[in-house]
Image: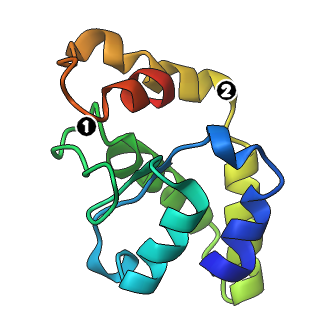
C-alpha cells in the first residue's frame, strides 16, 4: 500500500514541504516502512522511530487519533462495504470530501495549548494541526 499507492500519490505534491505524522501502531513501524518514510520525508517524519519523536498522547497534538480516523471510519463503513473496491472507493470519497474549514478548526488548537518552544514538534504543530 505505502509503496504502490501512498508514495506515488505524494509525488504529485511538493513533498519537500510536507510533514508526515505516523501513528504509533506497531504494525505501522516496521523497519522497512520507517526507512521508506525517512527516505521520502527526511527529518519531517514524526513517528515512534523517526527523527521527530511522537508527541505525548494528547487530543490537541494527535488529531489523527482523536478526530480524523474516527470521523473517516464512521463514514467509510456507513454503507457496510462488501468488497475491497467498494471500501477503497468509500475511503477516497470520504477523504476528498474533507473541507478546509473542517481542518482549519483543528489547526487553531495550537493557540490554546501553549506549546513550549523547546519541543522539537512545536513548529509542526503550529503549522499543521
Q: Which residue is mark 1?
A: 59
Residues 112 and 99: in front is 112
Residue 69: x and y in percent read 45, 55
Q: Residue at x 58, y 27 (%)?
A: 102
Residue 36: x and y in percent read 54, 74
Q: Is residue 83 above or below residue 8?
A: below
The residues bearing labels 1 and 2 have C-alpha atoms spaced at a distance of: 19 Å
Residue 44: x and y in percent read 47, 46
Q: Residue at x 37, y 83 (%)?
A: 31
**Which of the image's four quarters has the N terminus?**
bottom right
Residues packed near mark 2 inside 10 Å, few (<14), some (14 to 19) or many (20 plus): few
Residues packed near mark 1 inside 10 Å, few (<14), some (14 to 19) or many (20 plus): few
Q: Is residue 35 above or below residue 37?
A: below
The answer to which of marks 1 and 2 sits earlier in the sequence is 1
Q: Is residue 124 above or below residue 21?
A: above
Q: Is residue 116 above or below residue 34?
A: above
Q: Which residue is mark 2?
A: 100
Quadrant in which residue 50 is drawn: bottom left
Q: Residue at x 60, y 64 (%)?
A: 76
Amino acid at each position: 500500500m505505502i509503496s504502490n499507492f501512498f508514495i506515488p500519490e505524494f509525488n504529485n505534491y511538493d513533498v519537500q514541504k510536507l510533514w508526515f505524522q505516523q501513528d504509533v501502531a506497531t504494525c505501522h513501524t516496521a523497519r522497512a516502512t520507517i526507512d521508506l518514510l525517512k527516505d521520502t520525508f527526511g527529518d519531517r517524519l514524526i513517528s515512534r522511530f523517526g527523527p521527530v519523536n511522537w508527541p505525548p498522547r494528547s487530543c490537541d497534538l494527535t488529531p489523527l487519533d482523536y478526530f480524523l480516523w474516527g470521523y473517516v471510519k464512521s463514514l467509510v463503513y456507513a454503507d457496510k462495504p462488501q468488497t475491497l473496491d467498494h471500501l477503497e472507493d468509500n475511503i477516497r470519497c470520504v477523504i476528498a470530501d474533507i473541507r478546509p474549514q473542517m481542518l482549519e478548526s483543528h489547526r487553531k488548537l495550537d493557540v490554546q495549548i501553549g506549546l513550549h518552544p523547546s519541543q522539537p514538534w512545536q513548529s509542526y504543530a503550529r503549522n499543521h494541526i
